[in-house]
Amino acid sequence: MELTSFSVFLTVVDEMSFTRAAERLYMTQQSVSSHIKRLETNYHVRLFERRPVLKLTAEGEALAFYARGMVDSEEAMMSRFADLSELPTGILRMGISHQRSQVFMPGIWNRYHAVCGNISVRLREQMTNRLLEQLQSGALDLIVGVFIPQLSNLTVRLLSQEATYCVFHEKFLSNTFPDDWEQRLERYGQEGIDLMEFKDLPLLLPSHDNRMRQPVDQLFRKHNAIPRVALETSSHGLLYQLSFQGSGIALVSPLSLYEHTQLMAERPPYCHAFRVQGFPLTDVSLAWRNDVEQPQYVMAMAEAVEEVFEVYNETVRLCFDR
């Protein structure tokens, strides 16, 4: 049997849906079904129960076990051949969130392409839980995500620990606290910001489905307070822009601060950013499987990612952690 049919079968197993497998493989659902039928005919077995829900038969479980080993072995062989080649070629599959891709991939690409110019990079931009599933299934070579668990078959390297920041224009603060705004700036720089001080001021907040919003809501519930929310949005860029226009106090991630600093070469004058007190840090990590041999071009990508995040961490430290 061709390994293509095994790969298609494993994708259906991962997704437990012919439709989602077809979308992921950029194939028609009919083509996916044909590969499954070919396997069932060749081995005289039935691989899936289709009702009431799609699930593997006992024969399907057995085939998934052996098929995964065959596909992993072929990938390891191809990776080894690529390493032995004078001009290695290959396909690197990397998972990362959409926002981090927009911010970090230009720098990562410049570093990586300089040493691995013949490697084709395929990005999958999704949330960490989906990327982790695909890393474990072999559909991705490495991922950048948040709160990646320390599992025995994964190498996980911490890239950054991101705080939450309050951003506002100096004029907004001086108009709100005319008598002591300068002393407040000095105190915020030393201690960070207690968000409860701003509960009656217009707040520019991430939407409720954003992970950054959870500690905000928990804080106000703890103090039985209702914040004055001027704007909720899923766009971190919009939060940042409105804050330095003086529209209110925005809560943003250092990723947004770094992105706008890179785009504008420097922070807008009189725009301040300080850490919020007591909010949890977000662990951002790089991960790949250690139970399969990784080719040199995958490890070269890991090195490029770490270099870019070193720049990111240093920029945040110098420009905002003060």
Image (cartoon, rainbow, N blue to C red):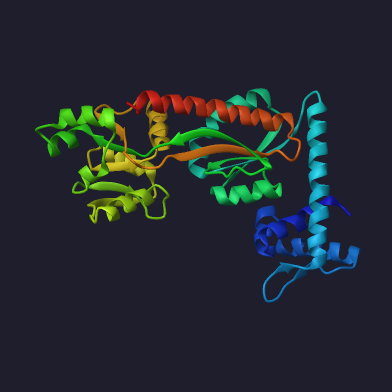
Out of 108 and 200, give the one closest to the viewer: 200
Q: Is residue 31 above or below residue 229?
A: below
- Quick check: 110 left or right of 299? left
Q: How many marks?
A: 0
Q: Look at 62% across and 38% down and name the residue there.
A: 287
Give the quarter of the image for residue 162.
top left
Give the quarter of the image for residue 17.
bottom right
Residue farthest along the left direction in this orientation: 179
Quarter of the image with the N terminus is: bottom right
Give the quarter of the image for residue 79.
top right
- Quick check: 99 left or right of 38? left
Q: Look at 44% across and 24% down and name the residue there.
A: 314
Residue 221 spot, x, y in % from top left: 29, 56
Q: Look at 54% across and 42% down and name the residue there.
A: 145
- Quick check: 154 left or right of 56? left
Quarter of the image with the C terminus is: top left
Residue 38 spot, x, y in % from top left: 85, 63
Residue 167 spot, x, y in % from top left: 29, 37
Q: Is residue 265 above or below residue 103?
A: above
Out of 275 and 28, give the one closest to the viewer: 275
- Quick check: 281 left or right of 167? right
